[in-house]
């Protein structure tokens, strides 16, 4: 994820997009790991607590990657794909996706998100 941010800061939009897509391509395994780590009851030790915090950070990074991909599509006026990625970001990490909420709201407010996306739960269909 740091490499994506470095590429973005240096102006390499395509390289950054490719790095964000690599993170997003691992969404299934990231979510599976988070479910595995959080399975069961409360954290029993400091190590358990740290694992849960790391899992939350993984979800946050995935949400950021999905938001960044949405921004790329929005910049290309591909609003339905942008909306889909914003919805994925919100579904992935709802509390950490303020930017995704705002950008998706803008697309809906201006009628740009309605081509191909009906409801937020369709984001992963």
Image (cartoon, helix red, strand yellow):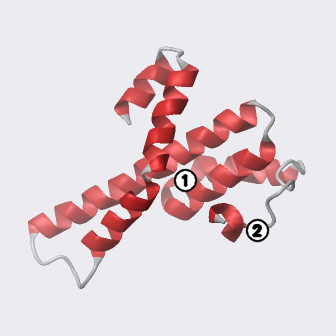
Residue of label 2: 119
Q: CA distance from mark 1 to mark 2?
A: 17 Å
Mark 1 residue element: loop
Look at the picture and state if 106 lies above or below 124.
Answer: above
Considering the image in quadrants, where does the C terminus appear?
bottom right
Look at the picture and state if 70 lies above or below 38.
Answer: above
Q: Is residue 85 left or right of residue 15?
A: right
- Could you tell which of marks 1 and 2 lies nearer the N-terminus? 1
Count residues near mark 2 (Cα–Cα under 10 Å), then give few for <14, some for 14-19, many for 20+.
Answer: few
In which image quadrant can residue 87 be found?
Answer: bottom right
**Residue 20, image x and y in percent?**
49, 37
Q: Which mark is residue 111?
A: none
Residue at point 45%, 40% (across, down): 22
Residue at point 59%, 57% (across, down): 88
**Residue 77, image x and y in percent?**
81, 35
Q: Is residue 69 left or right of residue 25?
A: right
Residue of label 1: 97
Question: Is 62 or 106 nearer to us in this picture?
Answer: 62
Considering the image in quadrants, where does the N terminus appear?
top left
Q: Is residue 104 left or right of residue 2?
A: right
Residue at point 62%, 50% (across, down): 100
Residue at point 58%, 59% (across, down): 90
CB under 8 Å between callouts 1 and 2? no
Q: Is residue 81 left or right of residue 25?
A: right
> Which one is in front in this view, the residue at disc 1 or the one at disc 2?
2
Q: Residue furthest right?
A: 111
Mark 2 residue element: loop
């Amino acid at each position: 994820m740091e490499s994506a941010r470095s590429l973005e800061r240096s102006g390499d939009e395509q390289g950054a997009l490719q790095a964000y897509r690599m993170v997003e391509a691992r969404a299934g395994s990231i979510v599976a790991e988070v479910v595995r780590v959080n399975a069961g009851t409360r954290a029993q030790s400091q190590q358990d607590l740290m694992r849960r915090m790391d899992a939350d950070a993984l979800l946050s990074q995935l949400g950021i990657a999905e938001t960044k991909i949405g921004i790329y599509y929005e910049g290309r006026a591909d609003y339905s794909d942008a909306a889909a990625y914003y919805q994925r970001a919100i579904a992935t990490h709802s509390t950490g996706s303020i930017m995704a909420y705002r950008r998706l709201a803008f697309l809906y407010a201006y009628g740009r998100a309605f081509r191909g996306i009906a409801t937020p739960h369709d984001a992963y269909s």
